[in-house]
Amino acid sequence: MANMGYPSSKSVFEKIKNRVFFRPGDAKKLGLTFQNIQQLLKNRDVEKISRGLYRVSNAEPTEMETIAMVAAAAPKTIVCLLSALRVHDIGTQLPHTVWIALNRKSRKPALLPSQVRIVRYSGPMLKYGVSQRTMMGVKVFVTSPARTVVDCFRYRQKIGLAVALEALRDAIHSRKTSVDEIMRTAKVCRISTVISPYVEALSS
């Protein structure tokens, strides 16, 4: 391969090994070509997860792997609700699907590598209490602990009031967030009147 003008397999792998999941566009930004990807596949350094999504073969799996995989396939999604609770280690929920939020006007991403549950955000909801972190080399947008708790009450008909109450109690008791931050977030999300009685009961 080197005689044909391609970089060595080792040098190609060094560029991609810390990303775990990547798409052809990511590889291109790192200076890798389609031929380089085919070389990595042939050497079993990477594996194809779905169309346009690859995984570094020897990466250690974690409980966040599925979330990272979905974020790699659909970079504009926001991890929320039960999946965000898992990210922040709030409560006891162990969702079998990845909960994501999309812009109300966006289409559902095609060919996602895992089952997902989708909710829709619009206006301030798209940015308030949403931050970016890196999971397994993938940039992931995720709701903050306070925003996640508030969203649990906003979407209580989808996930159940019991889940929302557990999230509220655990987030405050574990100091992942504060009552003040939850109430500020609830005001922005226009759900203060719903959540206030539960916060007051917990604080009394």
Image: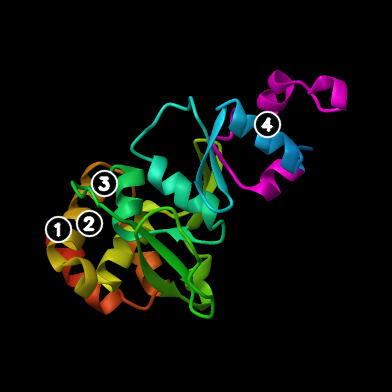
Q: Are marks 2 and 1 in contact (CB under 8 Å)?
A: yes
10 Å neighbourhood of mark 4: few (<14), some, or many (≥20)?
A: some
| Residue 29, horizontal then vertical, whole percent | 75, 43
Q: Which mark is residue 39?
A: 4
| Residue 182, horizontal then vertical, whole percent | 33, 61
Quadrant housing residue 157: bottom left
Mark 3 lies on a secondary structure that is loop
Q: Which residue is mark 2?
A: 168
Magenta stretch, residue numbers:
1-28
What residue sits 41% from the left and 48% below the top? 67
Which of the two labelled residues, at mark 3 and mark 2, occupies the earlier sequence position? Answer: 3
Say if 110 sits above or below 16 in the image: below
10 Å neighbourhood of mark 1: few (<14), some, or many (≥20)?
A: few
Say which amino acid is labelled 2.
Answer: Leu
Q: Which residue is mark 3?
A: 90
Mark 4 lies on a secondary structure that is helix
Mark 2 lies on a secondary structure that is helix
Say which amino acid is labelled 3.
Answer: Ile
Viewer-nearest of labels 4 and 1? Answer: 4
Say which amino acid is labelled 4.
Answer: Gln
Mark 3 to mark 2 CA distance (whole Å):
9 Å
Q: Is residue 47 magenta?
A: no
Q: Which mark is residue 202?
A: 1
Quadrant housing residue 142: bottom left
Which of the two labelled residues, at mark 2 and mark 1, occupies the earlier sequence position? Answer: 2
Mark 4 to mark 1 CA distance (whole Å):
58 Å
What residue sits 86% from the left and 26% below the top? 4
Mark 2 to mark 1 CA distance (whole Å):
9 Å
